[in-house]
Amino acid sequence: MTVSWLADWYCGECGSSGQERFEDETSVEAGHDCDEDGGPGSISWDGRAECGECGWVQETDFADDCWVASGHVCEDESAVPAGVER
């Protein structure tokens, strides 16, 4: 399985944001120390997972400092050209 994620994070306290790329089945953390109220801030993520084998795509939101796993099981062994969705 070759699923990777591209996700944007946003701090609801101070408005800071960033983007991360990571592999499936991993724990994600923005690593943002918010200057507002001296705390970690309120981080939310908006992510997109994509399988490099079959072109499957999933978009979802998730919380900071959590385990992210798509649950995708690739059953198609044929490659899909870039830009083609199934």
Image (spheres, rainbow, N blue to C red):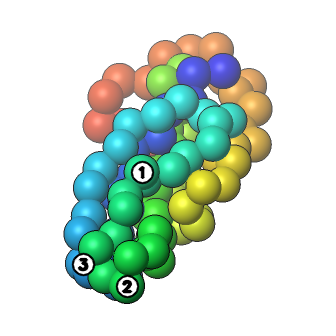
Which residue is tagged 1? 31
- Across and down, in percent, residue 39 comes to 45, 74
Residue type, mark 3 in image: Gly
Q: Which of the 4 quarters of the picture holds residue 25?
A: top right
Q: In this view, does 74 lie to the left or right of 84?
A: right
Q: Are marks 1 and 2 in contact (CB under 8 Å)?
A: no
**The residue tagged with tag 2: helix, strand or loop?**
helix
Q: Residues within 10 Å of mark 1 (few under 14, many from 20)?
A: few
- Disc 3 element: loop
Q: Can residue 55 be seen in this view?
A: no
Residue occupied by mark 2: 37
Q: Earlier in the sequence, mark 1 or mark 2?
A: 1
- Tally of marks: 3
Q: Which of marks 3 and 1 is nearer the N terminus?
A: 3
Nearest the viewer among 40 and 72 is 40
Amino acid type of the residue that numbered disc 1 sits on in the rendered structure? Gly
Label 3 belongs to which residue? 15
